[in-house]
Image (cartoon, rainbow, N blue to C red):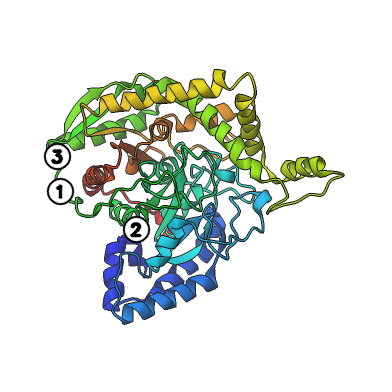
Amino acid sequence: MERILDLNIVEVRKLLKKGEISSVDLTRFYLERIKKYDGAIQSYLRTTEEVAMAMAEDADGRIRAGEDGPLLGIPFGIKDIFCAKGMETTCASQILKGFIAPYDATVIQRLKERHFVHLGRVNMDEFAMGSSTENSSFQTTKNPWDLTRIPGGSSGGSAAAVAGGLCAASLGTDTGGSIRQPAGLCGVVGMKPTYGRVSRYGLIAFASSLDQIGPITRNVTDCATVLGAIAGYDPMDSTSIPQPVPDYLALLGRDIKGMKIGVAKEYFVEGIEPDVKKAVADSIALFEKHGAIVVDITLPHTEYAVSTYYIICTAEASSNLARYDGVKYGLRVDGKDIIDMYKKTRMKGFGQEVKRRIILGTYVLSSGYYDAYYGQAGKVRTLIRRDFEEAFTRCDIIVTPVSPTTAFTIGEKAEDPLQMYLSDIFTIPVNLAGLPGMSVPCGFDRAGLPIGLQIIGQPLDEARMLQAAFVLESEKKVKTIPDSFKG
């Protein structure tokens, strides 16, 4: 069964269809790997073994009956931020410990309709606030390539589970880089689709104008497969885009001759590790070798992106997290009156980073400061979006590093929030502009740590990004599971 780790989902589906393996066998294989390896990685908060085996048996019955589908019988690890009916959903926070979701998020419903297998819930930064998965209230996930290092965040559990071969694919969320950054640091593929391409209904919100759901997979083919399954209009989400979903797999394998690739000087600034810079430069040269045309572009307002983001996201977080008050659901700590109960519940239930962002957000929304901070941030956000619009008049896609460095050691930046925030300096502008972006493995540094290339596309042009990513993947052939987690 170990050969399964070298196959994409399309190839595994062919084996399932032929009856050479069963979904039960496949699910048992991943559950056994979780038992064997996850003690070291700590990507899963909890497995749902009984549910998973029942779903696998159901999938096998459907396969025997002649049913087919892109995800039929395929085991996933799911970030613990999506409501899944009857399952505990905590957002890695004490304040939601024991909360059982009463309904399915749209993305979970779409996976269920395609008869996937739900292996369990993977770790994350609390309420998706963080870049290292060190902000989880329950455990710190490790990077499979070096267990002394962080896997990125907030979807660090998802990326580590995929990189460790502990699921076939995973779902993550991306508010300022939380799919792409951990995918890049763990050496796997991660896609943040266009804002509105994937429904956010049933996603526990962090910053509603920035959050987006996407796949984390071991290869580009799997990314295209999963994106095709979860994308599409949903009337339950008022920001959902009513546009048809293209066949993302159809463009894979086509050449990129004549494709214009934008390279912005603002993304190659001081502080980038030399190995990262070289891997990205080599990838750009590879695109040129395949007939792509490299175009110099400028994104002049990039330097304001981080400060703009941390005003907008904290403001929206303070509003969204006001609902956790000890009254409706989740943790409740009794007090002498209702105000005391609110205080004690939120003091005990929220972690340090979440409290920091609530306080910042409440401040920038407060009377007398709204126009100076949140209002101004909205205007700068528009300027950043216009930079991209202008750039895309000259190119088809934009390529940049995902992160300025490879994975740092656990605890290295825990006491310095500003340094931690700068980990997402290259990914944040994409969220502010509502654009699609993805991370593709493009090499390793001299310490053997993965490096990710970011591909940024025009709105709803995920297919072209996947086309370019597939060319890079086919040429580079970067391994995505460490040898220590094989066998």
Outermost residue on the right side: it is 336
**Residue at the disc numbered 2:** 229
Question: Could you give the CA–CA distance between mark 2 and mark 1, rounded to whole angstroms?
Answer: 22 Å
Number of disc labels: 3
Question: Could you give the CA–CA distance between mark 3 and mark 2, rounded to whole angstroms?
Answer: 30 Å
Discs 3/1, front:
1
Residue 275 rendering spot, x and y as whole percentages: 35, 32
Question: Could you give the CA–CA distance between mark 3 and mark 1, rounded to whole angstroms?
Answer: 11 Å
Task: Look at the image and tell me whether residue 487 can be seen.
Answer: no
Residue 290's disc is 3
Residue 449 rendering spot, x and y as whole percentages: 41, 42
- What's the residue type where badge 2 is placed? Ala
- What's the residue type where badge 1 is placed? Arg
Of residues 100 and 276, the one nearer the viewer is 100
Residue 254's disc is 1
Task: Look at the image and tell me whether residue 310 can be seen.
Answer: yes
Discs 3/2, front:
2
Badge 1, how many Cα within 10 Å: few under 14, some, many 20+? few
Q: Earlier in the sequence, mark 3 or mark 1?
A: 1
